[in-house]
Image: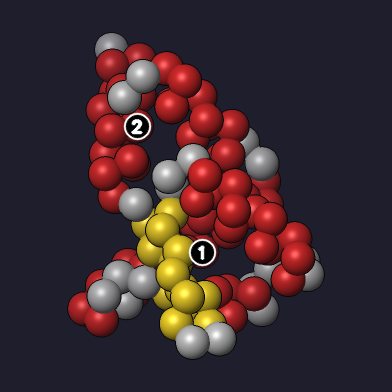
Amino acid sequence: MDSAKLSKIMKALSNQTRLELYLQIAKQSEANFETGCECFITDIVGSLSIGAPTISHHLKELANADLIITERRGKFLTARIHKETIQAANAILSLIEK
């Protein structure tokens, strides 16, 4: 992973609302591991006190940074963590710690 890609990831997660949304998706994805590791965005909306357009914007930013993968299921939107991106970012960040 190059520095531009890592910078995009860090920028996406530097926003508090996006970070909270990402953590909620990660938590739901982990809880739903046996059923496909994805969550319905409608399950998360209630835990955040922001409107649907704002959530949509933040989801787009997380997807553009390859942090999540979204998919439409009928009229519902699902999201899951993009594990390869997180693993690559963790590998780079572990080098910084040393």
Identified by mark 1, the residue type is Gln
Mark 2 lies on a secondary structure that is helix
Q: For residue 69, which quarter of the picture?
A: bottom left
Q: Is residue 45 left or right of residue 38?
A: right
Residue 43 in sight here: no
Question: Looking at the image, is 5 positioned above or below residue 47?
Answer: above
Q: Position of residue 86 (x, y in %)?
A: 34, 41
Q: Quadrant of the C terminus?
A: top left
| CA distance for labels 2 and 1 | 19 Å
Name the disc covering residue 89, or none: 2
**What is the number of callouts on the image?**
2
Residue 8 in sight here: yes
Badge 2, how many Cα within 10 Å: few under 14, some, many 20+?
some
Badge 1, how many Cα within 10 Å: few under 14, some, many 20+?
some
User: Which residue: 75% across, 60% down?
Assistant: 54
Question: Looking at the image, is 64 positioned above or below residue 32?
Answer: above
Q: Is residue 40 left or right of residue 49?
A: left
Identified by mark 2, the residue type is Ala
Q: Position of residue 39 (x, y in %)?
A: 43, 75
Mark 1 lies on a secondary structure that is helix
* Residue beneath disc 1: 24
Among numbered discs 2 and 1, the one appearing first in the sequence: 1
User: Which residue: 49% across, 34% down?
Assistant: 9
User: Which residue: 26% across, 44% down?
Assistant: 84
User: Which residue: 42% across, 17% down?
Assistant: 3
